[in-house]
Amino acid sequence: MDASKLIYDMAKQFDRMESAHREFILKQKIFFTASAAPTGRVNVSPKGLDTLRILDERTVAYLDLTGSGNETAAHLLQLPRLTLMFCAFEDSPLILRLYGTGRTCLAGTPEYAKLLPRFTPQPGARQIIVLSVEIVQTSCGFSVPLFHFEEDRTTMAQWVEAKGGEAGLLEYRKQKNTKSIDGFQTGMFPETEA
């Protein structure tokens, strides 16, 4: 299936990522994640840089970088549903969502070590989120505005350097990434989450 044929497929569903879906996903410079626990707030986060990998027709993973919170990891421990959304901000309009079950692969675990070589090294990497895709849905995206990509920001690398590298990041994560804003544990530091 040619990616151009996806343009007017409004709310069409697939049980796996077809080649045109994979082609579209890999062209995007930004994607969004959505997760929620059974109670509390719904989280939506933008993700950028070269952090997404398609592992097979039903599995994607992204290298999750250190942030001011760790909502997705906390939510996946509570309820493992996860959605990734991709929008065409350039070229023909299209929205593509991947619905499925997510899990967190923490740094230092065998699964993290196995997946990490698939990614370009990124400053501040803290975990890998893996999504087992159950439904792929495309929709029109007719009202999404056109934007022109200029370049990736260098702010993350600068922030990591200012934190003093891994030692500083570890301390920051202990302070900011152990619980969600609703108080749910993230699993990152089990010894401090009791």
Image (cartoon, rainbow, N blue to C red):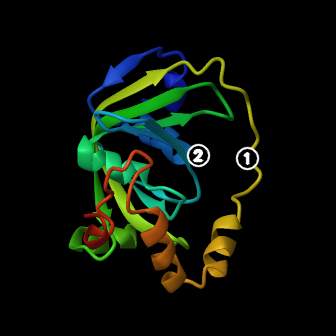
Other-residue count near label 2 (Cα within 10 Å), few / some / many at <14 / 14–19 / ≥20: many
Q: Secondary structure at mark 2?
A: loop
Q: Residue at x 35, y 55 (%)?
A: 129
* Residue at far front of view: 194
| Residue 86 circle label | none
Question: Circles 2 and 1: CB distance less than 8 Å?
Answer: no
**Residue occupying the point 25% across, 73% down:** 109
Q: Earlier in the sequence, mark 2 or mark 1?
A: 2
In x, y percent, where is residue 53? 41, 55
- State the residue in front, 11 or 8: 11
Residue 34 to residue 72: above or below: above
Residue assigned mark 2: 30
Going by the numbered disc 2, the residue's amino acid type is Ile
Residue extending furthest left? 110
Q: Is residue 183 above or below residue 113?
A: above
Q: Secondary structure at mark 1?
A: loop
> In the image, is 155 to the left or to the right of 136?
right
Instruction: Indicate the quadrant where residue 151 lies.
Output: bottom right
Relative to residue 60, is residue 94 depicted above or below? above
